[in-house]
Image (cartoon, rainbow, N blue to C red):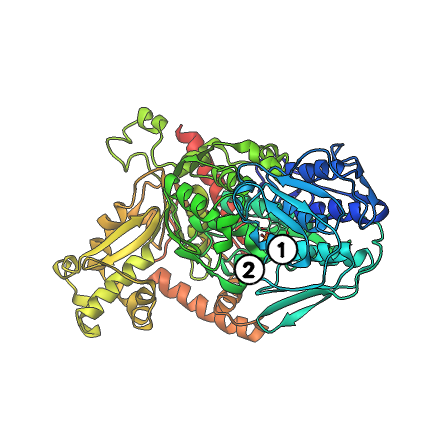
Amino acid sequence: MIETGGEALPGGRELSVRVPGDKSITQRALILGALAEGESRIGGVLRGEDPLATGRALAGLGVEIRGLEGSPESDLRIRGRGLRGWRQPDGVLDLENSGTGARLLAGALAAQPLTAVLTGDESLTSRPMERIVGPLRRMGAAIDCLGVPGRLPMRVTGGPLVPLCHRGTVASAQVKSAVLLAGVGAGVAVEVCEPRRSRDHSELMLEAMGVSVVAGAVEGGWSVGVPAPPTRLAPLDMEVPGDFSSAAFLLAWAVLSGCRGALTVRGVGLNGTRTGLLPVLARMGIGVDVAQRGTAGGEPVGDLRVAAPMGPPRAVEVGGAEIPAMIDEVPVLAILAARAEGVTRITGARELRVKESDRLTALALNLRRIGVAVEELPDGLEIEGTRGRLAGAAECFGDHRIAMCFGVLGATPGCDIRVDDPGVADVSFPGFWKLLARLPHRSASDRRGRTAYTRRDAARGDAAANPEAGCLVVAIDGSAGSGKSTTAAAVAFRLGFRHLDSGAVYRAVTLGLIERGTADAVLEEVTPEELAALEIDVKWGEGRMEVWLDGNRIPERDLRSERVTARVSQVSAIPAVRSGLLDLQRSARAGAGLVAEGRDMGSVVFPDAKVKVHLDADPRERARRRILQRGERSPGPAEIEAEADRLRRRDERDSSRRVAPLRRAPDAVVIDTTGLEPDEQIDRIVRLVEKARRVSR
Ligand code: S3P
């Protein structure tokens, strides 16, 4: 399924992949095709365990299906038996793991003049069926739960039904579809109101088959109805788009692996009732370009492209109305949250407890096991992102999405995760593991970078005895506006190194002095003793730098407050401050590596740094970036020139100041970033680090 690429992508290279057909659409095509009059042709179907189980159940009902177990390229042909033409099955219909198969078939069976017993595997027989049993009984179907009430196995005896207006308490496309299929099958009017709009594949497919579907917002939710069902369904002729839910795993991989270049997933279904993850990703700082290329069976189809990440994702709050359109992607969000900056809070997702597994518990348990701090809420999760090493065994609970999410996380740097039951991925994404293995992975040395101390490190030298000795230091400095902070953070993220932001340390000192009431006039006279009395400390929240003052972690908003910003350059020019902070900054060396960023990193703080980089860019380009960074829109030439002038004057001051002038270390590699995309800058530095590692080995 990989179309281009193969090895690690140097900056700018593109990797293009496809994912198997959409599970929800394939399931509906099978069932609706079986109710049509005439032969349906369906291309691009998912040949996963779920549709295969539905196909076998339909075969048991006398429906002739060709090509379902055939080659991925071949079309599927379904010879429909008409709205009420299914045959009495000989045995039990086993839907295995498929909730969609069981619930939609139960709806369709409610209108058939026959009796069928539906069952499933351990997971499916423990999932709630009352939500469909209730409305179908009210329409007139006879349904007996043969084991536990409200669970499979159940016997459905269909026949003539009465119209129904069903008000559901959960947003469920399966419940909605079951009622619509019963109404269409029996030729009676139906309407379903759900608290929030769920995926609308059934509606679109019914319309493509000649059914008039009425849908719209109503008080308290969303209503869908078929007021005048037709006497026959026209056969389908359609291509199933790639599954957005499967594509989501690959997008997450690209974000978390620091995939260099960009990853495009082609031919993906872009139905808005499914793509709710995209705006959430945008809030996390993950940009996904969406290009619609056409439609298939009324479904929008197109390409998703995620660019190389600039840094770790940001934590988000997600809940309420957002959940239905991303219900199957919450596990993907959870693994992104595990690597995000901050605490992600997911609420309103109680339905996850009744999916193929209790996904809230499965996610919480597994994340905790591998080293992520998680709080399980009744209807969601609170996940604290970490850059620390994640290792351990993930338990799948027979759930394809749990298996794939820990598979994806495990394929990213700094993780060593085993998945206990990888085979379950076949339910929705056959070939998932093969595809994952063929994606470009980081070099072994990169991966080692995420791991604080490997046995090889310890065996090679004195790293175990002296943590600082094994730590590769990358010193980054550069002129104002050259992009050093963002670049340093992104490089550290890619390599799994600590990121020392010396600017934040100077800000902490400034804040401390302000809080002590040191007047501006006497700042110059701060003594080393006064400085020591400040109790500035730097701690490492699993790779991320935290600055502490007097025993308390300084909140980001205090560090970046105006009063600090106004004085920090004055404070950082005090000789006692600079020398007083040397030891503290040097103590940041630990683990595999440190990206240290600041004006005198390569010359004074870490003169022996293995990699020294000096970033520069044309003043006009730096000016343009600064203006854009402030959130202003495309600046005009005059505005750019004025800002560039300010930067030139600042360069002058910076390089001629008495204390810690900006002077690049003679052995620093100068990178002119003027014409470079951010990921190209990052790539260049990462390549310098790789080279330094090879040399020192
Ligand atoms: C599906 C609907 C959703 C979803 C499931 C597939 C469908 O379930 O989670 O994976 O194909 O209709 P609910 O209807 O239970 O929300």
Q: Which residue is mark 2?
A: 170
Quarter of the figure with residue 177: bottom right
| Frontmost residue, 485 versus 18 | 18
Question: Given contact means CB atoms under 8 Å apart, are the residues at marks 2 and 1 in contact?
Answer: yes
- Image point (28%, 56%), residue name: 547
* Residue 291 vertical placement versus 89 (above, below): below
Quarter of the figure with residue 59: top right
Residue 28, image x, y percentages: 72, 48
Residue 219, image x, y percentages: 59, 74
Question: What is the secondary structure assignment of the residue under circle 1?
Answer: helix
Residue 668, image x, y percentages: 41, 45
Name the amino acid, label 1: Val
Assess disc 2: are there few (<14), some (14-19) or many (≥20) residues with their C-alpha within 10 Å of its C-alpha. some
The tag on residue 175 is: 1
| Frontmost residue, 458 versus 198 | 198
Assess disc 1: are there few (<14), some (14-19) or many (≥20) residues with their C-alpha within 10 Å of its C-alpha. many
Instruction: Report the quarter where the C terminus lies.
Output: top left
Mark 1 near ligand 1 (CB under 8 Å)? yes
* Residue 509 vertical placement versus 265 (above, below): below
Name the amino acid, label 2: Val
Residue 444, image x, y percentages: 47, 31
The residue at the far left in this view is: 529
